[in-house]
Image: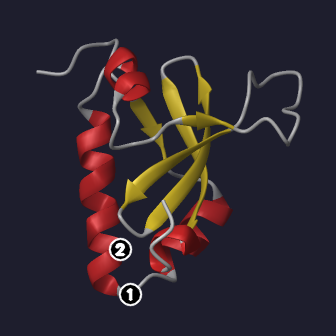
Amino acid sequence: MRSAKNVQLDLNDPFFLESWFALESAEAERVRAAFEKIHKLSWADLYKSKGLRWEKVESIPAPPHIDAFYTFRVTASVKGVAYRDGNFLRVMKIQPDHDATYGKK
């Protein structure tokens, strides 16, 4: 059973949807499965998950209504950009992780 403290997902950003729909079907399915797992996490678990590699983006200032932007690992070859809005993880974009492609981690 889900707790109210678990991560709620907002996957409706047009840039996110465009980048998700552009993936090959197998990778798009891995992304869907990853978000299903994230949806079951508490925020504390999300923050401390080593697999997600949740990291604050220091180089881009966030607008006043957003604490900060964050990057995280969605799959082994896809990274995401998002921000927290209350209980919601508002995913703005996903993109191939070029470092993973070339073996740089």
Bin the neighbour count of mark 1 within 10 Å (Cα to Cα): few under 14, some 14-19, many 20 and up: few
Q: Secondary structure at mark 2?
A: helix
Side (left or right) of 61 relative to 99: right
Q: Which residue is most to the bottom? A: 24
Q: Residue at x 72, y 39 (%)?
A: 57
89, 97: nearer the viewer: 97
Q: CA distance from mark 2 to mark 1?
A: 6 Å
Above or below, 54 against 32 in this view is: above
Q: Quadrant of the N terminus?
A: top left
Side (left or right) of 93 relative to 29: right
Q: Which residue is most to the left? A: 1
Q: Circle 2 sits on which residue?
A: 28
Q: Position of residue 4 (x, y in %)?
A: 32, 13
Above or below, 29 against 6 in this view is: below
Q: Position of residue 99 (x, y in %)?
A: 55, 69
Circle number at residue 54: none
- Callout 2 touching callout 1 (CB < 8 Å): yes
62, 85: nearer the viewer: 62
Bin the neighbour count of mark 2 within 10 Å (Cα to Cα): few under 14, some 14-19, many 20 and up: some
Q: Position of residue 14 (x, y in %)?
A: 65, 63
Residue 30, quarter of the rendered image: bottom left
- Three-letter code, disc 1: Glu
Q: Residue at x 24, y 57 (%)?
A: 33
Q: Position of residue 16 (x, y in %)?
A: 59, 61
Q: Secondary structure at mark 1?
A: loop
Residue 95, quarter of the rendered image: bottom right
Q: Circle 1 sits on which residue?
A: 24
